[in-house]
Image: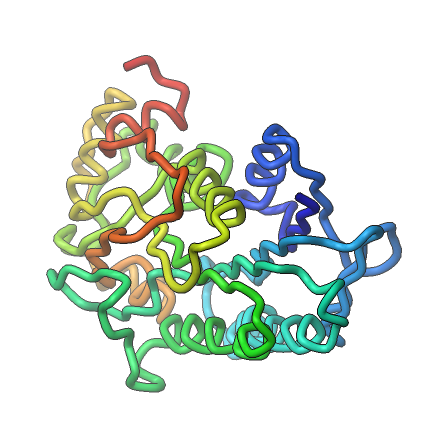
Amino acid sequence: MRIAITGASGLVGGALRTLLARRGHQVAAPRRGAGESTWDVETGAIHVPGGIDALVHLAGRNVATHWTTRVKREIWESRVTATKKLCAFLAEMPPETRPRVLIAASAIGIYGDRGDELLTEESPVEQRKGESFLADVCRGWEEATVAAERVGIRVVHARLGVVLAKEGGALAALLTPTKLFLGGPVGSGTQFLSWISLPDVVAMLAAAVEDDSFRGVMNAVAGTVRQHAFMRTLGGVLHRPTLFPMPGLVVRAIFGRMGREVLLSSQRVACTRSPAGFVPRDLTLQAAMRRVLDKNA
């Protein structure tokens, strides 16, 4: 297939690009500005020589930073507004040239802070506007694809959990303090954290591209554990104790609303539907951490 990936320079996009090419697909990475393959964020126009059969849309501003008013606007525009413009452009393309499938990134933050409630693809999402900025963004992000769905494009909403990788993301941020004997639970440590390894999430996304019958929501998670168990497992893999907690008051003081919604909120999420051909390799958190950190079992 001819596949385009927005956000191909990111953690997930880069790994997905490598996997799809290894599977024999032709992969393009449309960029802003001049180049062979381009994506104009302002108009939504995307151009790839020879056209595309599938589009994987992963681009968006990083949410793991302090949410100032400006940053919140940039997050919304890069994820919701840009996706809406992109899908409007796809809908206006001649039917014979538009992609058959759109895999659109989302996140499990759409469920809001739900404590110990087990959440699946059938669970209602957070609907109280303003209660959770991240939930509002994710809901708007998914609703932004409606124009593509209306013209018959097969749309998959990939609600990503915490992606485990040593190159970036939450796990990478925790490596140094843990190695320095400064690791420990965040907040109470009782909040649920739902995870998936980088190799498994890109395999899941690739399978969603290739499975013509799969559409709708999929929770891109492999397991869920309480945060203190997550840190204890990381400490075990690195052979370090995890005795230094970061109290919730400190998290809120340093990270503000982002800390409350991303680091302290609880989402106990399960994947109950996945595309044909996807078989997860990492069935336990320890196995996932060992694989992505290149630790021998």
Question: What percent of the width, then of the height, locates residue 1?
Answer: 66, 43
Q: Is residue 274 left or right of residue 99?
A: left
On the image, which quarter does residue 263 sit in?
Answer: bottom left
Residue at 48 percent of width and 40 percent of height:
202
Q: Is residue 257 left or right of residue 69?
A: left
Question: What percent of the width, then of the height, locates residue 214?
Answer: 43, 55
When the figure is inspected, residue 215 is found, relative to residue 181, above or below; the finding is below
Residue at 28 percent of width and 42 percent of height:
222
On the image, which quarter does residue 11 sit in?
Answer: top right
Q: Is residue 189 left or right of residue 96?
A: left
Q: Is residue 240 left or right of residue 173?
A: left
**Which colour style is shown?**
rainbow
Question: What percent of the width, then of the height, locates residue 107?
Answer: 40, 61
**Could you tell me which quadrant the C terminus lies in?**
top left
Residue at 45 percent of width and 57 percent of height:
64
Foreground of the two, 115 or 43: 43
Number of marks in the rendered image: 0
Question: What percent of the width, then of the height, locates residue 240?
Answer: 24, 24
When the figure is inspected, residue 111 is found, relative to residue 233, above or below; the finding is below
Residue at 26 percent of width and 50 percent of height:
194
When the figure is inspected, residue 273 is found, relative to residue 176, above or below; the finding is below
